[in-house]
Image (cartoon, rainbow, N blue to C red):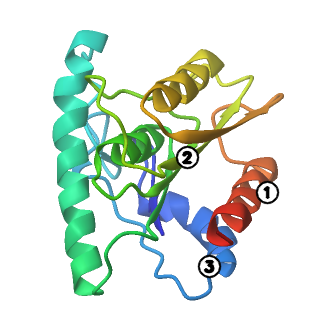
Amino acid sequence: MVLLHGVGSNADNMMPVARALAPMLPDADVLVPDGLDPWSGGPGAREWYSLQNITDAERSARVEPAGRALSAWLDEELASRSLDGSKLIVVGFSQGAGLAEWLVVRRPTAPVAIALSGRFYVDGDNKAAAGARALVVHGTDDRVVPLSYGEASRKGLEARGVEVQWVSLPGLGHHIDDRVIAAVRDYLMTVTSK
């Protein structure tokens, strides 16, 4: 299981989530990497790609290289453990959620993607690998990545053949609370029992 933080954050901020979810997968390695680049908004934090002066037209040009670099890193980590990726689970928050969604659509062996408060952005209309699955969780009161982006994520993934479970949480802003953790745990119970 790999956990991806949001922009302007770092691996340490995802550690409480990792600790909450790790008991669900007692035999799994749990990896929490830092984002690929220093955050363009200030020191001490990371990002997967820069949001500085970004427009929707430019987003693909930033998401695609980040997704490819992250996918290559995953390949290295899987190879070092002699794993084929068929049981890979990627949990992402905010910008990390968008990359989890990118991975489930783009990787030849799709990981289970768990996208928390994210925004889907995959250029083109390619189909995901057979059996691709995702959980999309979004709060109704998210002011950073509004609920409409979560709904668009669900639709974009479904259009590419991903089996999506959608959870909308009333009153949730742009953060992870106990309800989010409970939804993820329930989903993990479902996908790991298959």
Which numbered disc covers residue 134?
A: 2
Q: In which quarter of the image is residue 72?
A: bottom left
Amino acid tagged 3? Leu
Q: Is residue 77 above or below residue 176?
A: below
Q: Check if mark 1's residue and mark 2's residue have beta carbons within 8 Å.
A: no
- Number of residues whose C-alpha sits closer than 10 Å to that of mark 1, classed few (under 14), some (14–19) or many (20 or more): few
**Is tag 3's residue or tag 1's residue first in the polypeptide sequence?**
3
For label 1, the residue is: 182
- At label 2, the amino acid type is Ala
How far apart are the two marked residues, 3 and 1, measured between alpha carbons?
15 Å
Q: How far apart are marks 1 and 2 (CA)?
A: 16 Å
Is 163 situated above or below 142?
Answer: below
> For residue 155, which quarter of the picture?
top right
The percent position of residue 140, horizontal first and vertical second, equals 74, 23
Q: Residue 103 versus residue 95: which sits nearer the camera?
A: 103
Q: Is residue 4 above or below residue 171?
A: below
Q: Which amino acid does label 1 sit on?
A: Ala
